[in-house]
Image (cartoon, rainbow, N blue to C red):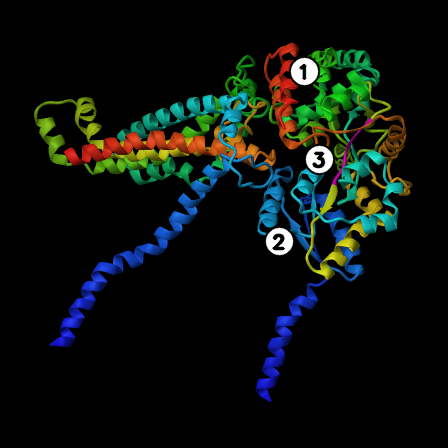
Amino acid sequence: MKRKQLSAALLAATLLPATVFAGEVEVLHWWTSGGEAKSVAELKKMMTAKGDNWKDFAVAGGGGDNAMTALKTRVVSGNPPTAAQIKGPAIQEWGAEGVLANIDAVAKAEGWDKQLPPVVSQVMKYKGQYVAAPVNVHRVNWLWVNPDAFKKAGAKVPTTWPEFFEAADKLQKAGIQPIAHGGQPWQDATLFESVALGVGGPAYYKKAFVQLDQATLAGPTTLKVFETLQKVKTYIDKGAAGRDWNLATAMVINGKAGMQFMGDWAKGEFTAAGKKPGKDFLCVAAPGTAGSFTFNIDSLAMFKQKDAAAQKAQADLAETVMSKNFQEVFNLNKGSIPARLDTPMDKFDDCAKKSKADLTAASKSGGLVPSFAHKMAMPSATEGAMDDVISQFMNSSMSPKTATERLAKAGKVH
Amino acid sequence: MSSSQSQASLSALADRWLPKLVLSPTLLISLVFVYGFIAWTGWLSLTESRLLPQMDLAGLIQYQALFENDRWWTAVANLGIFGGLFIGCTLAVGLFLAVLLDQKIRSEGTLRTIYLYPMALSFIVTGTAWKWMLNPDMGLQKVINDWGFPDFTFDWLVDPDKAIYTVVIAGVWQSSGFVMALFLAGLRGIDDSIIKAAQVDGASLPVIYWRIIIPSLRPVFFSVLLILSHIAIKSFDLVMALTGGGPGTASDVPAIFMYQFAFTRGQLGLGAASAMMMLMTIVAVLVPLMYMETRSAKRG
């Protein structure tokens, strides 16, 4: 009798994990800071409500580099998580390794093709099939402005490059640092791509940084971009080297600096400091980029799962991520805007509403371009080589001509 | 009779096999996890591996790509500057401190602890602390400016041409206490009678140090050189915390290069090639040193 009970218990113990972990989703991400962590907690809540088990796999630090290393280890050992925060062309790279799951069934049933701008859905597909779900859209080509500083200097908020330099001169005369910048390679690249889009326009941008066309990269427009950047450089203080982006934002917040080129995550810093958009700070498109939109999209790429319950849970996850409800909550916390175009925007602030309107307009006019500084446009090897050239240009007396030649050479790396 | 015989043969067997048996697990672990992985990295450096390892040999293309990469040569040049100055200055400062402390002064224990303490910090902490101190907007420069010297500038940290020297400063500060402790131990190990004999012959203290004591510290020099050169070649955390390899890529070193290309840029093969080059550098330093040391040991 006793033995029977024991063996029953043993049997239960061996079977139990299989049943308990059947509908488990494990999501690898690096959303670990305040607002981001809140957003993830929301996703967890929604998944648990659907009866799936949530297993958090957060790897902090290094802008996701650490997380990617952890992911590689897991995939190589044949035990990938359900989904991982992978974005841009990296989705294609992982797809080429043959480890991503096809979630077309969910996408078809939910009509993702209608809800996403075509440029965005392209990024989520590998060989025409959905392998990832977008969670948000960040706009990168923003210029953050301190209106009080501008008033003090008697300057006008710029919309073109000549106006920009005029305003910068006035700020400098008034003793205000015109541009707050952090001299880290990715910030240099962020500044560069806003200048490139403003000077060259979306058609040039796409040809140079998406198609990596050699003639365009080595051409006169790139030279003009570097010449403009060289002029922009003179309005940046020497202490910028190595400064974190949020410290640069703080300079705009407290009026030490007038403007900052940064994506919409900077908004979080302003609102955390109790500032109101439109009153204490302004969000305007970077000079010359009003009709365009440089996007940086976070997405969850789905990995192939062996057992059926895990596949079911994965489908649940994909469905939840693309639900209006999740898109709204997640992006309210994170400062970005929903990837799903039909998400209601009434709870969002003015910057986000403007971002959404520009996204919709740019998507129709062809002004919607991927941000290469944020790993959306080109393979990581090419992007790295370009970042090297740009940050060397920003931190040396390299001439625009040499920089153009080197950038074209970097475009060949892949 | 026969039982004691078998016992004897058993103990002989144990004598012969026990040491090997005891050493084998560590040997095996080292073989697999050190030399095995070195071999694997070497193999990877000969493949076209991108995001994940691939196993088909592709010849020396990664080395070719590495030698054509400007950034690699910046990193190598920086390693030369940093390695040379770091080892040189740390040796000099460490030896100088050790000689000073060797003068039978009071409260030597306390002083030794003070000098040695930086070694207890990690390079990350050292790097972060010095990053603040050397930052022209809030560190040394600002303090001295506020004292009434508005023209004083010390902005090496944000100057692309000089950033690597700030890494030397922080590295020397971190390691010289440790080197001092090694030298001090060496100094204390020298036979007093030789020094007394020299004193009887009328040699001055500097001469005694220069002609007798420092030459007899040869084995200590060997260990210190060995330790410092591998710290220099593998240095990653200090540079990462202090300058982040910047401004731009101005203070890049091979270890950062390897990490970025292998793990963040999806160029595993190229990263492996750069790792192999670092290994070669260590071997190039190590082999002559070992050779010199074993030869002198034989002579002695």
Give me the disc on residue B253.
none
* Disc 3 crowd, CA 10 A, few/some/many (<14, 14-19, 20+): some
Amino acid type at mark 2: Asn
What is the quadrant of the N terminus of chain A in the image?
Answer: bottom right
Q: Is residue A233 left or right of residue B164?
A: right
State the separation of the CA atoms marked 2 and 3. Answer: 23 Å
Do tag 3 and tag 1 residues touch (Cβ < 8 Å)?
Answer: no
> Where does the image place residue A115, in percent across and percent down from the top left?
88, 42
Secondary structure at numbered mark 2: loop
Q: Quadrant of residue B111?
A: top left
Could you tell me which chain the residue with mark 2 belongs to? Answer: A
Vertical side of A54 occupied by A65: above or below: above
Q: Is residue B13 visible?
A: yes
Residue position for label 3 = A89
Q: Which residues are magenta?
A: A293-298
Residue position for label 2 = A79
* Disc 1 crowd, CA 10 A, few/some/many (<14, 14-19, 20+): some
State the separation of the CA atoms marked 2 and 1. Answer: 47 Å
Residue position for label 1 = A233
Q: Is residue A180 left or right of residue A321?
A: left
